[in-house]
């Protein structure tokens, strides 16, 4: 079967760094993506890892280890506007995406 | 970035009626679009894959006769919720697949349609 595990909630302080982990068990894995979703809004694409290693995009970085079936999203210099839900998602060769249950990020001033 | 629109953004209907939701890719052609449903405080659940010019592929447990999908052009897919009931009330989100410059595709999401069935 398919499963993705990520923490349900994480709390961090404004200006700090936070890491959201994601582990997955799936067949036909193609890549790992991360999406951000604010309350009432649609998901927005943050990053994609098709190969092992770190991808950096501004304040956000994402990491993948295919051998460990593990990835994480790293958010630096946290801002209040980063308060949202973050979903890891597995991509398959047929272009489907299966989402994790999401991590609610709370940021304290 | 790529733009995907949905219409309507919200709809309230009576039980037993049908509701059509449109998903458009505004600045690129999408042979493949996806429809998701999201209940409050839950994840996005893939309902079906919409392929231009062919029948949609539904995920296990999704009734194809209840959720009719039509992908008549490279920029438009529609989802019709037939004979809607209160349990169909949810946030419906579409996405369109767009090739990226590095050779991988990514999905761009529409803003979602909130359906409330009374």
Image: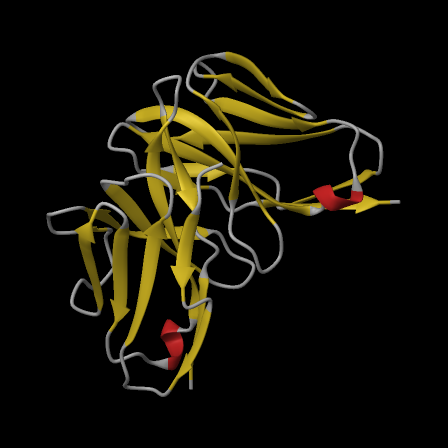
**From the viewer's perspective, is residue A67 above or below residue A21?**
above
Please determine whether, in this image, residue B72 is positioned above or below residue B17.
above
Residue B102 visible, this orientation: yes
Q: Is residue A43 above or below residue B106?
A: below
Q: Residue at x 39, y 38 (%)?
A: B107
Residue sitting nearer the eye, B65 or A42: A42
Q: Quadrant of residue A13?
A: top right
Q: Which one is nearer the viewer's eye here, B100 or A3?
A: B100
Q: Residue furthest front?
A: B27
Tell which residue pokes out farthest to the left in this image: B54
Residue at screen point 58% across, 26% down:
A72
Q: Is residue A81 left or right of residue A26?
A: right
Q: Residue furthest right?
A: A109
Q: How far from the left and from the top, in percent, is residue A104?
A: 65, 47
Instruction: Say which residue appears at 39% left-offset and 17% top-offset.
Output: B102
Front-most of residues B37 and B103: B103
């Amino acid at each position: 079967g398919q499963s993705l595990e990520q923490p349900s909630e994480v709390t961090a302080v404004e200006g700090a760094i936070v890491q959201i982990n994601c582990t997955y068990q799936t067949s036909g894995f193609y890549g790992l993506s991360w999406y951000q979703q604010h309350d009432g809004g649609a998901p927005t694409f943050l990053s994609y890892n098709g190969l092992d290693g770190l991808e950096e995009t501004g304040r956000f970085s994402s990491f993948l280890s295919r051998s460990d079936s593990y990835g994480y999203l790293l958010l630096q210099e946290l801002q209040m506007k980063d308060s949202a839900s973050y979903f890891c998602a597995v991509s398959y060769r047929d272009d489907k995406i299966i989402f994790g249950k999401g991590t609610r990020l709370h940021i304290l001033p | 970035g790529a733009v995907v629109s949905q219409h309507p953004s919200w709809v309230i209907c009576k039980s037993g009626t049908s509701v059509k939701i449109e998903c458009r890719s505004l600045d690129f052609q999408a042979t493949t679009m996806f429809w998701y449903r999201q209940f409050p405080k839950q994840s996005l659940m893939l309902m079906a894959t919409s392929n231009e010019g062919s029948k949609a592929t539904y995920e296990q447990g999704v009734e194809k006769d209840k959720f009719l999908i039509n992908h008549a052009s490279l920029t438009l897919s529609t989802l019709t919720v037939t004979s809607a009931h209160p349990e169909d009330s949810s946030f419906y989100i579409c996405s369109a697949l767009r090739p990226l410059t590095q050779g991988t595709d990514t999905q761009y999401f529409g803003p979602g349609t909130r359906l409330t069935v009374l």
